[in-house]
Amino acid sequence: MGKALDAGGHHDHHEIPWIRQYIFATDHKMIAKQFMFVSLFFLVVGGALAGMMRWQLGFPSQPMPGGMILPDAMMAPTPNGAIMLPEFYNSLVTMHGTIMIFFAIMPLLVGLFGNLLIPLQIGAEDMAFPRLNMVSFWLAVPAGILMLASFGVEGGAAGAGWTSYAPLSTSGEWTGVYLGQQLWLASLTILGFSSLVGSVNYISTVINMRAPGMTWFRMPLATWSLFVTAVLILLAIPILAGALIMLLFDQTIGTGFFRPEVGGEPLLWQHLFWFFGHPEVYILILPAMGITSEVLANRARKPIFGYHSMVLAIVGIGFLGWIVWGHHMFQSGMNPLLGTSFMISTMAIAVPSAIKVFNWLATLWKADIHLDVPMLHALAFVSMFIIGGLSGIFMANTPVDIYIHDTYFIVAHIHYVLFGGSLFAIFAGITFWFPKMFGRMMNEPLGKVHFVLTLIFYNLVFFPMHNLGLRGMMRRIYDFTQYEFLAPLQPMNQFITVFAFLLIATQVLFVINFFWSIFKGEKASENPWDSNTLEWTVPSPPPHGNFAEMPMVYRGPYEYSSPESDTDFLPQTTPPGGGSSGVPEPTPTPEGVEA
Amino acid sequence: MTPTTADRAPMAGMKVYNLKLGMWVFLLSEVMFFTGLIGAYIILRFAHPEAFAEPGVVLNVPLTAFNTFVLICSSVTMVKAFAAIEQGDQQGLQKWLLATILLGAFFVGVQIVEYTILTGEGFVPMAESYHAIARGAAEGSAVIGGPLYGATFYTMTGFHGTHVSIGVLCLCFTLWRARKGAYTAGSLGGVEIMGLYWHFVDLVWILLFTIVYLI
Amino acid sequence: MNWGDWSWMMPEGFSTFTAEVDSLYYLILWITGVTFFATEALLIYFIVRYRHKEGRKATYDHGSTKMEVVWTAIPLLILIGLGALSKGAWDRMKIDVPAGAMEIIVTAKQFEWNATYPGPDGALGTADDFDVLNQIHAPVDQPVWIHLRAEDVLHSLFLPEMRVKQDAVPGRDIPVWFEAMATGDYTIGCAELCGIGHTTMNGTLTIHSAADFQAWASARAEQRPQPQP
């Protein structure tokens, strides 16, 4: 930091040793790619865990294909093959949730897009603290290794659910998992520190490093959402860290924070966990909303409808997210008088989400919609988020929640938000910014096949889960056929399992497209999507230091199809009057000129 | 002229340099961390008042009050160090940094002594010592909850002590840099953010001392 | 897949809660269903109607405050109204245990439900109490007040046909009540992950007629093992 950088980048490239450029990199774009590769790997791991879980649910206690290669602690060998053990199923439930949330979706949204987009979109040459940024990534790696290693230790990986409710999680006496649970706690504490360091960086960068003219209300919505997300991480993660450490003490040295047998309070864990956990839900969806807004406005060639209210909705969610945690605890034994207050606040937080959906729809009205792969994924996000949002109303309603709480209805809901929502937005984002990251386009036909199959299979897997929940099937249950009233659900579970395997297999297309395109994709120009935002004014991929000269920003990010321009876009850097042969404005002043 | 991190002109109105802004943002998260710990303490204490001793029964309040005074003094010396470098006074900076380090180290030392005495008396955060008897209390008359009282006490004061220890190490680093002349009246960011952290840790202690020892 | 299993209807319920819970469910189903079809139809219509064609240029339009106020206010009113509407049902189900309820204790532990009945003296906590394992017996048309407890970890008492679910928390005594409206055998399930045997932690809720219940209770009270001195 502080060293003068030649923006052309040609002599920097020779000066930075290989290890500083690719391994212990401080360049935000390289760190973004590092986060991407690592979290895509974890996405594959999480998918594999889900596949094993689905096998057990579709074919309860039947030998699992390939199960023989797993150790006896996980599978019980029989002459016909290996059958999954319930303790391993509990580990799968726990680790699938943990890995997908903390090691796949969160680092993809925040680690990848936060690092990639924030400096480029606000016109900065890097993060405020590039070395701290490197520390953030290199804390996440050991956390991931610890988490994976817990599968191999005696007693297996953590098995108390991704929420690790006390007192089940406080002692191996209850779960049979000793070291695995402790590794889980240690890993998440380290990862929390990594996220914290990252968010300090993002917040400082957005506040301090914006280019001249980049006022708050000229910031692209992706950056806005990542900024608010960083604030949520900053304030929520320390609460989780504190709770994790207390639980670790309960596990290892015998303190009694959450252990009722020595006077502790099990519900204290739930309050702390969800006080972090509900902001976490928005950490996982806000960046996805931001990415969708970018892609939608760009591919619809139309200004985003109601930019200011979109920003207010993001900020509003950021505030309201702090007062709704109790809606995860309606049936927990928490004072039922609180149930109603949390129901009302939860209903209120649905409103900003509704505003966003309506604004996206209105953005498409009288637009010029280009249905390329990023746009398809963004549209899928909107469509699936509608389902996930609406199904949330059922469980926000306290009396109905009594019935559907802890059933597959909840499982369906969370996957409509996290997979249908966040993951589709991640696909939209990766395909949209791929040319900026790698200088090449992704393969369009292959991308479309992947999109169509994913959308179909995804809905065939998760939509029927609403029905399972409505029939009363509990979540996290190893063998639902133990219950007489659930046994008729076997065919539906088998159906879901078959399409879950097809859904997983479909992702191979994405992997192929991804790696093929890195090396063989069509070369991308500086601005292949005719976009307005600053990241498209620099070469693809951008050189070290990003901008050859300080960009000057004259207008908002979504000036598509503006009458001021001869084309259907008007970059933020074009001075007033510079877009067409129209009347030239007086002297362009970069600062404070409202568009 | 090409832009660099160091010499770029920030947005109008952004008067805070990166390092200071980053420290403020980081301290916000620290506030939340201690809020979580203190919140857990308050909830447990309200739910199980019988597991917590009255002030002064187990903990040595006068000793810790003195220690609190020491830490407050160290904040004063930290202010002196910053004031010195603002005047470009290198000798003063080093002198006052050293004083801050010594006072901080003394605070940690007293805390270690306190821990040694308390654990020696059987006040430990383990479940096995749930019925550990408080100093001065008759056998069986006071039940001091190790798993709750001890756990919250050692967790809160322990994390604070860790913060002080890290602070002392960072102060040593700052002093080492100061001796090499790294700070001047025009470039004192490192000293300023060190001070911010140190005052924050001091403030947290005043809060902890009040609710853990006095209330 | 047997599509005959597919239904948006709630499964049949047999307690006095059923009407309230199910009607709220159907109300939300209608609201969300209409919203779902309206928004998705609009989405698809826009995608088809405004797809890119040569020479098309999108309208340059930054939004309309009036429209945004409308679509902020409407969901807000609907949702807050829904919340207010549900308060009564919630309070009845979770807070207001009716007078004259038959009291029993249900204690959850890994991996069984233990129901304690008051015995002939009609009072809980006395020597003539008797226990039944993984069964709850109750009379029809009379409120049953369960003191829900747990010995080790969290469990969740789930009586799907009665529309009852409540976590059991060690160290707490949580009131749960319901009133069955039909005799028969129903499900007891555990809805909170409670360890390796979570899946086996099920039982049977038997609703008797008032006379049958009396007969069952006195028969069980006699079989009760003699209390230890």
Image (cartoon, helix red, strand yellow):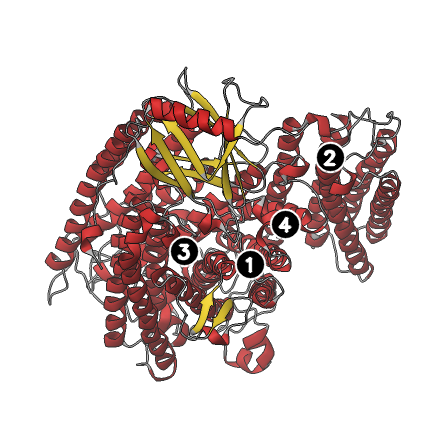
Say if mark 2 contacts mark 3, CB within 8 Å. Answer: no
Residue identifier under label 3 = A479
Labels 2 and 3 within one chain: no
Q: Give the alpha-carbon distance from disc 3 to disc 4, as whole Å.
A: 24 Å
Residue identifier under label 4 = A171
Q: Disc 1: which chain? A: A
| First in sequence: mark 4 vs mark 1 | 1
Q: Residue at the top extreme?
A: C99
Q: Secondary structure at mark 3?
A: loop
Residue identifier under label 1 = A128
Q: Secondary structure at mark 4?
A: loop
**Which residue is drawn at the image coordinates 27% and 62% (left, top)?**
A495
Q: Which of the two marks, 2 or 3, is nearer to us in this view?
A: 3
**Which residue is drawn at the image coordinates 46% and 61% (left, top)?**
A119
Amino acid bearing label 3: Asp
**Which residue is drawn at the image coordinates 42% and 52% (left, top)?**
A477
Q: Which of the two marks, 2 or 1, is nearer to us in this view?
A: 2
- Figure quadrant of residue A434: bottom left
Q: Which disc number belongs to residue A379?
A: none
Residue A546 visible in the picture = no
Q: Which disc number belongs to residue B149?
A: 2
Q: Secondary structure at mark 2?
A: helix
Q: Which of the two marks, 4 or 1, is nearer to us in this view?
A: 4
Say if mark 4 contacts mark 2, CB within 8 Å. Answer: no
